[in-house]
Amino acid sequence: MPNNEFSQIPMVDLKEELRLIRSPILETLTEVLDSGEYIFGEKGEKLENLVAQYAGASYGLGVANGTDALQLSLKALNIGPGDEVITTPFTFFATGEAIAQVGAKPIFVDIEEETYNIDPSKIEEALTQNTKAIIVVHLYGQVAKMNEIMKIAKTNNVRVIEDACQAIGTEYNGKRVGAIGDIGCFSFFPSKNLGAFGDAGLVVTNQRLLYEKVSKLRNHGSEKKYHHSSIGMNSRLDEIQAAILLVKLNYLDTFLGKRIEIAKRYTENFINLLKAPPISEHRNHTFHQYCIELDDRDELASELKNNGIASAIYYPIPLHLQKAFHYLHYKEGDFPIAEKTAKRILALPISPTLSVQKQDYIISTIKKFMKNNG
Ligand SMILES: *Cc1c(COP(=O)(O)O)cnc(C)c1O
């Protein structure tokens, strides 16, 4: 296939997605503009209820973004200076940043090769008297080993925050992520599986007390106007973003299904050539990213680029080796699996709107590369 067949295949094709939903989006935006209600209104409340319901949680609270969702969750659990929070070093920076932002200390635990998520068998050795919580990340949309993690948390009296920013709709033993631990965090950053047209996030929980705390904290520690009982934040999800998300929520399951379909085709084609993610019957992976692993990752990335196909590395530097975390005194070699994965991982385009022709073109380009280099 000539490489000018497609202008460019991006990682996510938000423009193509917009083509499908343009008219209901314009309609709802007009409604919000005419309502004169822009923060704390009908749309936001409806979204909170529907996302909570979708995740299987009793309560939902819109916040400004996924990072704030994590920070507010930590604060609601009274986590701060002197406390330790266990998490994975192989995640987006925000997971570790939120822990540091509330004044607590991030404690990293290496990942499993199989899921790229925190390895439950290594959590216990990282627990100390100061451990207050574990932030579990469902990376790329794949659920972490929640049974094991929840058991460790219960036994040791620590709380579990789910960073489900990449995993809305992912299922585990009949439950959905976000509602398995004590409190769950979603991001609606535009490129996420449910994306706004700006920043937005949401916290879900089954615990009334945590709901009340986040509710107050996101609004300057205030329940009653101009009465402030604690130091909070300004972290809200505005009506315009809520309205957009309400429209897009109607498409979420269809789009997740498409992602899984594309992932299945990829894996069927790659499985004997390189490390590709397994596809399960259950929806325990919703493929926010579809990542392969190989030795000559960088060579493949440039070959793809030469053929007009985008690819990306999530994430090239594990958190324990980030400059911002030098003060924690971790060093190269501390988390060998995370470090090895960072050198070998490559994400491929997986927009729900990616056509079969484009999928085939990506598959054949990779197969050709592997034949010549594998
Ligand atoms: C996107 C993301 C966040 C942060 O979400 P924002 O809405 O961008 O603040 C946190 N954790 C993970 C794993 C993410 O992918």
Image (cartoon, grey):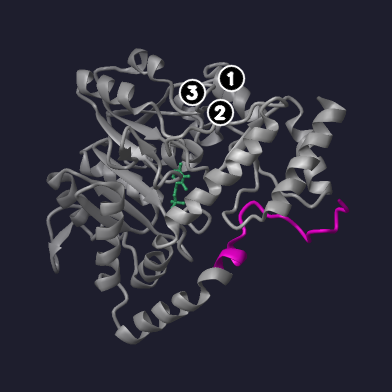
User: Farthest residue in the top direction?
Assistant: 125
Q: Quadrant of residue 137?
A: top left
Residue range in magenta is 1-18
Residue 289 among magenta residues? no
- Position of 306 compared to 352: left or right? right
In the picture of the structure, the residue carrying the numbered disc 2 is 321
- Closer mark to the observer between disc 2 and disc 3: 3
In the picture of the structure, the residue carrying the numbered disc 3 is 111
Separation of residues labelled 1 and 3 (CA atoms):
15 Å
Circle 1 crowding by C-alpha within 10 Å: few under 14, some 14–19, many from 20: few
Q: Quick one: label 1 or label 3, which is nearer the N terminus?
A: 3
Q: Nearer the viewer, residue 276 or 138?
A: 276
Residue 11 among magenta residues? yes
Residue shown at the point (82%, 41%) measured from the top left: 303
Kind of residue at badge 2: Leu
Residue 332: numbered disc: 1
- Position of 28 compared to 42: left or right? right
**Marks 1 and 3 in Cβ contact (< 8 Å):** no
Q: Position of residue 286 (x, y in %)?
A: 48, 43
Q: Nearer the viewer, residue 170 or 338?
A: 170
Residue shown at the point (40%, 83%) measured from the top left: 30
User: Farthest residue in the bottom direction?
Assistant: 34
Q: Secondary structure at mark 1?
A: loop
